[in-house]
Image (tube, helix red, strand yellow):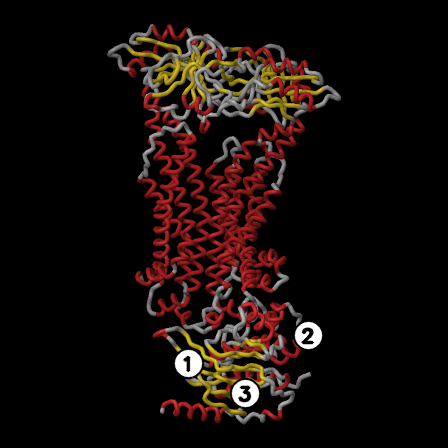
Amino acid sequence: MLAIPRKVYPARLSPAPTTGLLPRMTRDVAARAVGVWKVFGDGVAEVTALREVDVEFAAGGFTAVMGPSGSGKSTLMHCLAGLDTVTRGEIHLGATRVTGLGDRALTRLRRERVGFVFQQFNLLPVLTAEENIRLPLDIAGRRPDPEWFRTVVDTVGLGDRLRHRPAQLSGGQQQRVACARALIARPEVVFADEPTGNLDSRSGAEVLGFLRASVHDHGQTIVMVTHDPVAASYADRVVFLADGGVVDELAGPSADKVLDTMKRLDTEAAR
Amino acid sequence: MIRATLAGLRARKLRLVLSGSAVVIGVMFVSAAFVLTGTLGRAFDALYTGVGEDFDVRVTARQLPGVGDEAATRPVPDALVARTAAVAGVATATGVVSEDGARLIGHDGKTVPAPLGRARLGNSWTGEHGPIRLRAGHGPASPGEIAISAALADAAGVRVGDRVGVLTQRPKRVFTIVGIIGYTGGRDSLGGTHEIAFHPSEAADLMLSRSDVHSAIDIRVDAGVRPDELRGRLSIALGDDYLIETGYEVRAAQAAAAKEDLALVNQILLGVGGMTLFAGVFLVLNTFSILIAQRTRELALLRALGARRRQVVGSVLLEAALTGAIASVLGLGLGVGVGALLAGLADSIGAGGLDLILTVPPAAVVTSLVVGVLVTLLAALAPALRASRVPPMAALREAATPDRSLLRLTVAGAVVAAAGAAVIIVGFAGGTEDPSLAAVLGGVLVSFVGFALLTPAVARPATRLLGRPFARSVPGRLGRLNAGRNPRRTAATASALMVGIALVTGVNVVLTSATASFDEQAGDYFRTDLIITGVASTERPPTFDPAVLGRARELSGVAGVSGQYTDVVQIGDRRVGVAAWDDDAALLTSVKVDRVAGSLGPLGPGEVVVDVATATAQGATVGSALTVTFSSGQRRTLTVIGTYTSDFSSGWVLPRASIADMASRQPTFGMVRLAPGASKRDVRAGIDALLTDSPEITVTDRTGFVGILTGVFRTVMLFLQILLGLILVIAILGIINTLAMSIMERTREFGLVRVAGLDRGQTIHMITVEAVVISVFGTALGTAVGVGLGAAVVATLRSEGIQKLALPWPYLGAYLVLGAVIGVIAAILPALRAARVDVLRAIAYE
């Protein structure tokens, strides 16, 4: 069984352990963007959201993607997850070339190989917490591994609330249910888009701690988009985006280091 | 505030069009009713010009009050012609024959029907006069020759020189057509009636069963005498037994009678319009409720900015009024078209030649607009009041819609439903002969409202139950849960369907029960094997040659035959239908009646038996002597020798000797008992062969006879199914509307499930299950309510002979299947829309 403390995770202020010390860490690439461009609209209204982005996300790693509003971080995530198409370049998920897949194949890819956590409204209001967690498996027609289910449920600390509906749960609890749902199918990559954006700091810490634990204890790969340096500090690695391009990278970040980097990038941009 | 309302109206065009469509359809029928009546009414006035111009004053026998004055007209005796001619101011007095019931047998061996059940007149030929013009040939110059109206010649496909069979009060006879009759203004018929002109020497015998009588005496006045002046003098000279009318009055009365038929069509159309509007109320109510739920924040913001409650209510009601007005105008426009179309249709079914001028009475415009706007306002009232209760704080909070308690609604629903059911039962308290239609219809509508209020309470468990078969797949499970997630919305959507299905099911239950009861009672009553009877195509029951009965008796395998003759007579101050049997001894072995007092015969001349209830109503007991006046005018004194009861029949049974006194001396009904071991099929074929000259008469067994008796039920059911079809269209629109609006609210959820791996097909599956569950819920509810109401009516009609509750299972099953089909149809557009939801946009934050 897991020896992860329930519910309360202290906010991380110190640097994360170096990646080399992590168990079951492999250097396989879980997701990769190669020369990706994303252009919205055309003519006068043309907006370039991503320009020539090359980035890799290692399997078993927890990567934060940071950047100011409009830097293209959400677009990058959507493209990586197969939710959006790229204008130029290629996206790979594991050994699969995502670019060029049809709707049916993309749906399958999402169903079987990718998990999602959004900022809010993650749950279907008609389903209980448990049914929400099982939804991806049910859709795929797979039976949950009971042990893994219990592990996930214990980890998010919702054992006594499984029969509740989302409306009966707090924001933090709802988001933990969303995390559990993202993990239940053991996807190759979990994409989290500002998962703590709508939570108070304590609830946010719980969710982030849970995400980190799933990486470190179960080898889950997570790509998280955020603009919060504290949230980013839970990751093993931070990728900084600005104006649609990767501008910097940080391994083993602390909140202070992230903040420093952001300030530096801001000043560079101002110049 | 007004500007905000108008902007909102423009922004929500599609939803309002959908919800308004029910109002459009309802108003369409209302205005079509007015336009049809206006247009045809005007044409009818023109049609009857010429009627009554061939005489100044007409004398007819005053009909006795009471039942069935149409079944047998009292003729005027020939002697009266001379008496009339002797009155000062009368220039000429001519006895004429003009009676309904001259049925020409067409090439197919069947009688040719007149359009819309109009009269098939058998007249005496008195030359071209009034509106009558010969179009071809000449008038009948000797017995055996006839002239027929152009419309009849057209319908039958016959020409001058053809020999045709005609049924009258006498058995079939073959006549030669020697002339075709037209009418002034190039018309083929007068108001659609068919006409056969016989030679005067035989017209009375054919149409009135005797030769010394006339239908009427037509009078021309001396120069300088006013018709209404002569009328007074005639009524003094002839006494109270005779009705004296001027030509003008006759024309007005005939046009009024035609318009009365029209009034029935008018009422049917208004009824259909009323029902569709009633169903539409649910749709409008739902639309506005959802719109307001979606705009909670917007409304709260208005309140926070200082808008008063009344302004919020006013804003919603203004939106409703505008929607209603637009829908009413559209409905009015469509209604004018439909009314014109129906008028044209009536013209082409009828004789044609109607001078149609499209007439839109002011009442059509006023009623359509008022009804349409009022119905919409009424439906929007509850949502508007709810909107005004949105607290300003709601603008700042998450737009949460907590489940409000359904208790008050449910209690109110139960009370209203019970009140409605009580009103229905009160309506039937007067019996089937004279149910209070207003009470019955009002009760049905009130109870529908009650059931609609009860629906939300059962919506969630019911949709869970009905959705169970779909719960095996994820999309099915989600669809099932979504169907029950907003009980009020689901209930309102299902209610439109419930109303239609309940109405039709309720009537169906009553009619099915009546049929089953008839069947059982007929089976119990008839001890005979075969029944000779006809399907009445006019108000007079079809008759057949008495010789058929004699010849049937001689067939091998026949043990006994009794034939029934009917008449309408006056007993005391009542006009009642009576029957006499040519073999009342055979009768007693052919049917099951229970003797109560005295003897049931055989009846000697001057003896009569009657059922107990009729005897009591008449104040007669065994031994009472009664004066019976036959419609032929013959008067007899008869003595009651016995009373009986029977589940199936009632009334007076006269002795065989009375047949000679009756207006028609042809049987209307016959019962055949087979000898032991005889083949029913052979005997039936034998009797069939005897009936070749009576195309309206058939020989059938008990089951077939019940089928004929209940034939009118099938017509009623057919009409109701058409009405149901219309309500279903509205229900489908309602489901589409609700689903479309719910899908807009749930865009984000679609994004979520799509991201979680649901493909397009599964999304469509999910929406379809939701729609099917809602529509099957509506139909199930409708059948339940309909069966309940029907059973309640059947229970109150127990004393009327409907003693058995029978459910129309095939129909009930078909309705449930129909419900599922409707769900699938209604889901198509919303499901495609949901499947096309752009995943990225759906998951984007506001």
Question: Which quadrant: the C terminus of chain B?
Answer: bottom left
Query: Could you tell whether A177 is left or right of B727 in the image?
Result: right
Residue at the farthest left position: B224
Which residue is located at x 46 percent, y 17 percent? Answer: B73
Type of residue at label 3? Ala
Q: Helix, strand or loop at disc 1?
A: loop
- Chain that bears disc 2: A
Q: Which residue is mark 1?
A: A70
In which quadrant of the rendered view does residue A206 lie?
bottom right
Type of residue at label 1? Gly
| Callouts 1 and 3 in the same chain | yes
Question: Total number of numbered labels?
Answer: 3
Type of residue at label 2? Pro
Vertical placement of residue B205 versus B278, above or below: above
Residue B139 screen position, x and y as percent: 40, 12
* Sequence-earlier tag: 2 or 1: 1
* Sequence-earlier tag: 2 or 3: 2
Residue B824 screen position, x and y as percent: 54, 54
